Each structure stands twice: as C-alpha cells, then as structure tokens.
Image: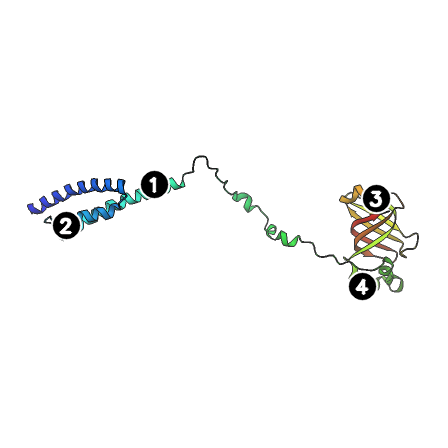
Amino acid sequence: MPKTSEAFHRSFTWIGHIHTLVWVLELVWKVSLLAALVLTIMLRLLHLALRWPDVCALFAAASCFCGARWLRRRQAKMMTDAAPVPGEQQSPAPNLTEARNIPKAHAVATVEDVAPARIIIDLKPAELTAPYKSYTSAQADALTALYIGKWMHVSGPMRDAQSFGSFMQVTLEDTLRLYDVGVIYLYFSEEWFDRLSVLKRGCVITVLGKVKNVGSAELHLKDCELIGEA
C-alpha cells in the first residue's frame, strides 16, 4: 500500500512537470496538447509501479483536463471570429416587419402587369355601326360584341374637347359623311390633357383607341392615343 501511495505521489509530481512542458511545446511548436500529454504519461508510467486501473484513472483525468482546455480555446476562437473587424462596414439587418407587410400579389406583379398584345381591327366606323341599320339593337349588339375591347384607328375633324376630371372626352362629328356615323366619342386619360387642350375646333386628328361601345349613330373608343393632328 505505501508503495502505491508513493507511486501516486511521484505520478502527480511528474504530471505537473509534464503539464508545464506540454504548455511550452504548445506555445512554441503548436503541438497537440492531448497527444503530447498522453505520450509523455505513457512513457513515464512504464518506469512506475502502477497498476492498470491507476493508469486508466490518470489517463481519464488527463483527457478531461485537455478536453476542457480545448473547449475554452474553441469558444474563444468563435467569439473572436464573430467580433466585427474595426473599420469594416456592417450590412444592415433585414427589416422583417417590412417584409411581412409586402402584399402577396407583389411576387407575381411582374407577370400580371405585362400588357397583352393589342388586336387592331381593320374596319371603318361605318362597318361597325352597319348591323344597327339592318337588325334590331339586341341582334346588332350580339354581332358587334366580338369587336368590343379591340383597337382601331379613326380620323376626322374635332368638334369639341371637354374635361371630366380624370379623363377628357373628344368628339369627332362626321359632318363630311366620311364614316356614315353621327358622332365618334373618344376618351383620353390625363396624360393627354396638355396636348389636346391646344388643338383647335375643326382640327383633323388621327386616333388609336379601344372599342368601348357601338350604337346605330355613334361609336365610343376608350384608352385613346393621339397619333397625329393636322
């Protein structure tokens, strides 16, 4: 028993020396602490009268000590890597509140906002109003429904231009019987107000518009664009 106590005492004394040696080695040559400690202990224990349970206990204690030091170094390295570099501009954190407030429809806006191709019909105004002269209004409405929403060109002398706030109504009167239509009503958006307001009565204009409504003596075009004037 005294022999075992003396061996333990000598072992712990050597462990202290070994710890100092390994610490120096680790600083100078970056030697792995665990590998150096285990190797040194095993070589020294070959000259001590220790039983294998004692060797295992010393090995477990050394492993725990080395593991604790390794964890401390790893945590310190992680904190150093996460710290901002002086002078480096940090990216602003995303505003999650604003992201949640974005309407869902915004994600598909680039698809829905694409304007469909215009279908331009090659018909004269008189050809659109002709069914109302041969059929009843109900029958003529059914025959002209195919052209509602299509685009067409019209030209003629401007009779009047009147603003209604969000749109301007321009009328073309077929006084020269050019179209065999009484009145053509053209509806322009606000972006055309300045250009239309300087046109004189009787000025011949050319317009591209979308068919809104057709009657026996009138034609209505919306979303009109002024192509030219003379």
**Number of the front mark, 4 or 3:** 3
Please name the residue that numbered disc 3 is placed on: 162
In percent of the image, x 39 and y 41: which residue is there? 81
From this viewpoint, is residue 76 visible? yes
In percent of the image, x 83 and y 44: which residue is there? 162
Which amino acid, by three-letter code, is at mark 1? Ala
Which amino acid, by three-letter code, is at mark 3? Gln
Asked whether the residues under the numbered discs 4 and 1 touch, taking CB atoms below 8 Å apart as contact, a structural biologist would say no
The residue sitting at the top extreme is 87
How far apart are the two marked residues, 2 and 4, measured between alpha carbons?
105 Å
How far apart are the two marked residues, 2 and 3, measured between alpha carbons?
107 Å
How far apart are the two marked residues, 4 and 1, measured between alpha carbons?
82 Å
Which amino acid, by three-letter code, is at mark 2? Asp
Q: Earlier in the sequence, mark 4 or mark 1?
A: 1
Please name the residue that numbered disc 1 is placed on: 76
Please name the residue that numbered disc 2 is placed on: 54
Please name the residue that numbered disc 4 is placed on: 142
How far apart are the two marked residues, 4 and 3, measured between alpha carbons?
31 Å
Asked whether the residues under the numbered discs 4 and 3 touch, taking CB atoms below 8 Å apart as contact, a structural biologist would say no
Apparent side of residue 186 relative to residue 90 in the rendered image (left or right)? right
Q: Earlier in the sequence, mark 2 or mark 3?
A: 2
Asked whether the residues under the numbered discs 2 and 4 touch, taking CB atoms below 8 Å apart as contact, a structural biologist would say no
Number of numbered markers: 4
Q: Earlier in the sequence, mark 4 or mark 3?
A: 4
